[in-house]
Image (cartoon, helix red, strand yellow):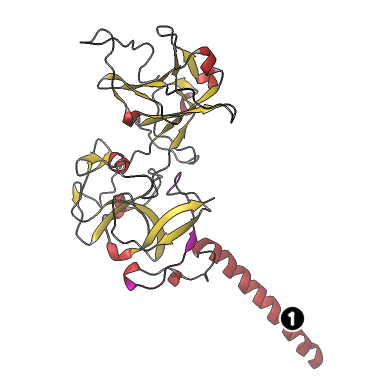
């Protein structure tokens, strides 16, 4: 029996090594950069001046739709932090990826559920930055099929979008702050107003003939308008369009209202060449205050206030309060997919 036992020892050692490697590999896929060993120390705080890893993997969807599970991102030294930067930050013994909402000296408040920084809605502060300078928030797609657009009986040159709410049996309602990725999340939805329209050619050889006029419903002015640029039109670029019946007004409001929030000047021939797609900007809110954060919050000089782009599910400074700048391990750059 002794020779048999000696022969079995190498086999047992090999099997043990395989099991250990398998466990380590699975853990590493969830916690480590793909080109580094699985270890919580693979990323170090930027103020240690230790070399930062060049890439790492996103786990989870708290930054969706900007970053989604499995994205491979580059990481760089932070330098001077600005509102909007996406950072790797550590708390509770784990590494997280969040967006900087406020830095030292900023005042974060909650106004009708929305987060404001220095008196401005956070999404409006982010829109002031050049999108080439940081990882800007992605747009959230809004359900918009061809049959959701119809001719405006009062203004036949316009196609008007009626939002069919998938949570209310396709009843036409205002656009809400739904996140398609959050299939299992149950919560109260909120109406949004920062809409975006894409005018997309049906074939690659067809480009926009000319800028098209786009109208958005606006609670204050009834309607605002802008012209598409490069196939896109944004509510935030629109200016007041005076509706007929108001002082100096000549524009027909037509079907435009809260449940029909977008209209595009598009004749029948143009409509045959393009498809229309609706998106919304991420709106940063705190609808379920934790009680740990008392608004307004003044961020300390050595602190940051961070949020996730998947606003309803992210755990961040809305629950934890401002975090120390020393917890930041690097700045996240654009992902490769």
- Does residue 59 lie above or below 45 as drawn? above
Which residue sits at x=61%, y=74%?
20
Residue under pointer 1: 11
Q: How many marks?
A: 1
Tell me if residue 89 can be seen. Answer: no
Occupied quadrant, residue 24:
bottom right
Magenta stretch prevailing secondary structure? loop
- Does residue 195 lie above or below 240 as drawn? below
Q: Position of residue 250 (x, y in %)?
A: 29, 9
- Does residue 264 lie above or below 191 as drawn? above
In this rendering, position of residue 72 left or right of residue 99: right
Q: Is residue 58 magenta?
A: yes
In this rendering, position of residue 108 left or right of residue 175: left
Q: Position of residue 308 (x, y in %)?
A: 37, 49
Of residues 225 and 150, the one nearer the viewer is 225
The magenta-colored residue range is 48-66
């Amino acid at each position: 029996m002794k020779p048999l036992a000696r022969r079995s020892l190498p086999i047992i050692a090999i099997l043990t090594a395989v099991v250990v490697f398998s466990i380590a590999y699975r853990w590493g896929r969830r916690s480590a950069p793909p080109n580094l060993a699985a270890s919580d120390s693979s990323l170090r705080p930027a103020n240690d001046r230790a070399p930062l890893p060049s890439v790492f993997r996103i786990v989870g969807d708290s930054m969706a739709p900007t970053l989604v599970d499995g994205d491979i991102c580059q990481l760089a030294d932070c330098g001077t932090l600005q509102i909007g930067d996406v950072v790797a930050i550590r708390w509770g013994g784990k590494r997280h990826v969040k967006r900087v909402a406020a830095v030292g000296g900023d005042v974060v408040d909650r106004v009708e559920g929305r987060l404001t920084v220095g008196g401005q809605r956070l999404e409006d502060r982010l829109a002031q930055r050049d999108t080439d300078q940081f990882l800007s928030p992605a747009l959230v797609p809004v359900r918009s099929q061809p049959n959701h657009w119809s001719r405006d009986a009062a203004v036949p040159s316009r196609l008007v979008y009626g939002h069919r709410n998938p949570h209310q049996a396709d009843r036409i309602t205002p656009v809400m702050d739904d996140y398609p990725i959050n299939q299992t999340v149950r919560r109260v939805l909120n109406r949004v107003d920062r809409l975006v329209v894409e005018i997309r050619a049906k074939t690659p050889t067809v480009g926009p003939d000319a800028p098209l006029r786009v109208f958005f419903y606006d609670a204050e002015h009834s309607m605002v308008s802008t012209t598409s640029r490069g196939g896109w039109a944004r509510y935030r670029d629109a200016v007041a369009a005076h509706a007929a019946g108001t002082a100096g007004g000549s524009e027909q409001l037509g079907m435009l209202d809260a449940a029909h929030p977008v209209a595009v000047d598009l004749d029948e021939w143009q409509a045959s060449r393009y498809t229309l797609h609706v998106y919304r900007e991420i709106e940063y809110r705190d609808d379920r205050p934790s009680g740990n954060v008392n608004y307004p919050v003044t961020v300390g000089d050595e602190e940051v206030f961070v949020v996730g782009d998947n606003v309803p599910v992210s755990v961040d400074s809305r629950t934890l309060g401002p975090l120390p700048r020393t917890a930041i391990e690097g700045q996240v750059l654009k992902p490769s997919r």
